[in-house]
């Protein structure tokens, strides 16, 4: 359920950026129409509503700090504004969970690398995500390493 919540959070953050939708609108849409829903013969996971909301709220509340951590983890010529919007949403979701401090950073990294694999099954993005999140975790929670 937590893994599904992380995936849904990335999708919701992406949707908010792409459509200028509000947090309340996107949260309601996901909680009403995606959590546990069956669409086109595909059944979505139930998800953990509390974790989903915490990630979304944390990503929005700490977006500036998360984006700065992400920028420091990226190559100088590739600031966060230049990366794929799905990856940007993923880094914001993972950063929010790291800053909340309720989940060990290695678990956050592993979970969001799996989310990257779901979005980019054939690409190099999961390895890229792993490296960036490791850098971010060492900055956000140095005591955990």
Image: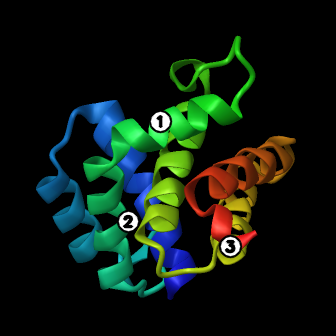
The residue that mark 3 highlights is 144
User: Could you tell me which secondary element the residue under label 3 belongs to?
Assistant: helix
Name which quarter of the figure residue 104 lies in: bottom right
Distance from disc 3 to disc 2, alpha carbons, whole Å, reads 20 Å
Name which quarter of the figure residue 134 lies in: bottom right
User: Could you tell me which secondary element the residue under label 2 belongs to?
Assistant: helix
Expressed as whole percent of the image width and height from the top left, the position of residue 38 reads: 41, 79
Q: Quadrant of the C terminus?
A: bottom right
Q: Mark 3 touching mark 1, by CB under 8 A?
A: no
Q: Mark 1 touching mark 2, by CB under 8 A?
A: no
Asked if residue 139 lies left or right of residue 36, the reply is right
Callout count: 3
The residue that mark 2 highlights is 55
Q: Identify the mark at residue 67; answer none if there is no mark.
A: 1
Expressed as whole percent of the image width and height from the top left, the position of residue 26 reads: 22, 56
Asked if residue 83 lies left or right of residue 99, the reply is right
Q: Residue at x 50, y 69 (%)?
A: 6
């Amino acid at each position: 359920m937590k893994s599904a919540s992380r995936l849904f959070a990335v999708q919701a953050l992406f949707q908010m950026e792409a459509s200028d939708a509000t947090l309340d609108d996107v949260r309601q849409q996901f909680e009403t129409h995606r959590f546990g829903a069956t669409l086109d013969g595909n059944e979505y996971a139930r998800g953990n509503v509390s974790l989903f909301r915490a990630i979304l709220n944390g990503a929005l509340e700490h977006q500036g700090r998360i984006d700065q951590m992400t920028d420091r983890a990226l190559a100088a010529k590739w600031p966060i504004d230049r990366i794929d919007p799905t990856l940007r949403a993923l880094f914001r979701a993972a950063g929010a969970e790291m800053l909340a401090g309720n989940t060990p950073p290695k678990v956050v990294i592993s979970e969001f690398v799996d989310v990257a694999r779901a979005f980019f099954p054939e690409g190099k993005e999961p390895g890229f995500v792993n490296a960036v999140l490791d850098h971010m975790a060492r900055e956000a929670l140095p005591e955990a390493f």
